[in-house]
Amino acid sequence: YGTIIAGSIGLGFTEITVLPHWVRQGLGTSVAVTAMAKLGVVHPPAGALAIIYASGEYHWGHLGLSLLANISAIVVAILVNNLNLKRQYPQYWCWNPFASY
């Protein structure tokens, strides 16, 4: 979820053209990291994604490509980890019935 949040915020700061380039990058990254921390989904590489997208050279299609790359990486990880009979990934689908919420 951190990638979605940071990418969206970074691309949102791209639309603010009245600010200088370096201010958009700084604010985009700081707001993205703060939002991820508040939501409890901190993902450090997503902060880098926010600064890249806030540079103004990217559009919303690039966010879709990053999400597609993340989904494909997760699918490969699930397939490879489930080939071994001693391992299962993820441990629980949808929720953990033994977790104390």
Image (cartoon, grey):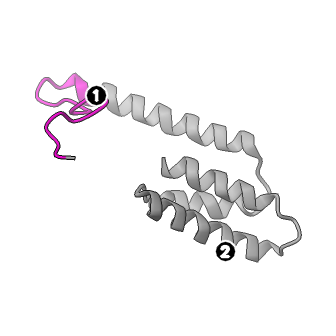
Judge from the rendering whether residue 3 lies leftward or rightward of residue 53; answer left or right.
Answer: left
Q: Is residue 99 magenta?
A: yes
Give the x, y percent position of residue 78: 32, 29
Q: CA distance from mark 1 to mark 2?
A: 37 Å
The secondary structure type at the circle numbered 2 is: helix
Which residue type does callout 1 highlight?
Answer: Trp
The secondary structure type at the circle numbered 1 is: loop
Q: Residue furthest front?
A: 101
Q: Residues within 10 Å of mark 2 (few under 14, many from 20)?
A: some
Residue for point 65% across, 51% down: 8
Instruction: Give the camera-side residue of 32 and 76.
Output: 32
Find disc 1 in the rendering and name its residue: 93
Q: How many marks?
A: 2
Quarter of the figure with residue 12: bottom right
Q: Is residue 34 magenta?
A: no
Magenta-highlighted stretch: main secondary structure? loop
Query: For the magenta stretch, what is the residue range?
Result: 80-100
Mark 1 vs mark 2, foreground winner is 1
Q: Residue furthest right?
A: 18
Give the x, y percent position of residue 49: 60, 57
Q: Residues within 10 Å of mark 1 (few under 14, many from 20)?
A: few
Tell me the number on the disc at residue 26: 2
Which residue type does callout 2 highlight?
Answer: Gly
Q: Are marks 1 and 2 in contact (CB under 8 Å)?
A: no
Give the x, y percent position of residue 89: 25, 32
Tell me the number on the disc at residue 66: none
Dot 1 or dot 2: first in sequence order is: 2
**Vertical comparison of 71 with 36: above or below:** above
Judge from the rendering whether residue 56 lies leftward or rightward of residue 42; answer left or right.
Answer: right
Residue for point 78% across, 59% down: 14
Give the x, y percent position of residue 72: 48, 31
Judge from the rendering whether residue 56 lies leftward or rightward of residue 63; answer left or right.
Answer: right
